[in-house]
Amino acid sequence: MRTQASNYVGSSFMGVFLGIIFSIICVQLSWGQELPEGQKRWSSDSKLTVDDFKIKISDINNEIAYSQFMITHAIGGLDFMKKNMNQKVENMFLGNASYIDTTKTEDLQKQIDFQQMQFDLSEIQARSFRKRALKDKGQLTKGFDIINKINNEIMAELTEMRMTLMRETDSGRNEEKLAEWKELIATKLKELDEFRFENKEKIKLQK
């Protein structure tokens, strides 16, 4: 049997709390097929652009940009035999649930870059999910409790990371802190490079 679960995260404090709520919602996805319209899988070669945000607004009462992301897994009982879990866990940007105010052109790209940082944090957690699922794959023979546990822990960690990012950078306004976070994110992605979605090679975990 294949199981599917999803977690949604946004790009503001409101998004963080919505992410906690949406983390228990199950969705049906077509794995291995073309992505649904509006979804974008994380890629180092394809960053977020204004066109990825399908909802355009003009409202001074809202943030300039707001993003929703989704980490999904499709791990089944027979996956305990796999040597790589990378394509069993996906990290998606949901354009149909994300908005941007294109009238605030003076800092539009800066805001898009900040959304990308949120997406990158989600990717770090997706890679951690893949690593931990591979490490504990032997427990799949006993059921899916271990995957549910990893899923919940990954999302709790992501929520905390994103809240810290927004607090320390003043939602992207503190340039010094932004630079520190960008360096930290780049380092973590490099450390977990084996666990990127595109890598299909056998992974031998370090003991």
Image (cartoon, grey):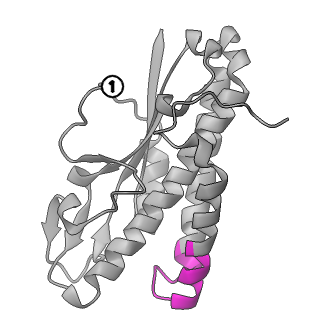
Viewer can see residue 155: no
Q: Quadrant of the C terminus?
A: top right
Write the residue at 20% across / 85% down.
104
Indicate the position of residue 13 as horizontal and vertical percent values.
46, 67
Amino acid type at image mark 1: Gly
Q: Within the image, what quadrant is residue 77 found in? A: top right
Indicate the position of residue 64 as horizontal and vertical percent values.
28, 77
Q: How many marks?
A: 1
In the rendered view, does 43 fall on the left or right side of 150? Answer: left
User: Quick check: 50 above or below 26?
Assistant: below
Write the residue at 60% across / 70% down.
164
Task: Give 89 or 84, whichever is nearer the viewer.
Answer: 84
Asked if the magenta segment contains residue 125, the reply would be no
Q: As drawn, which residue projects farthest toward the front?
A: 201
User: Quick check: 121 above or below 83?
Assistant: below
Dot 1: within a 10 Å radius of its alpha carbon, few (fewer than 14), some, or many (20 or more) residues? few
In the rendered view, does 128 fall on the left or right side of 37? Answer: right
Task: Give 195 or 23, whichever is nearer the viewer.
Answer: 195
Q: As drawn, which residue projects farthest toward the right?
A: 207
Q: Which residue is mark 1?
A: 32
Task: Give 18 or 194, whichever is nearer the viewer.
Answer: 194
Q: Which residues are magenta?
A: 166-182
Write the residue at 46% across / 81% down.
172
Give the overall secondary structure of the magenta segment: helix
Viewer can see residue 133: yes
| Tag 1 secondary structure | loop
Indicate the position of residue 51 as horizontal and vertical percent values.
17, 63
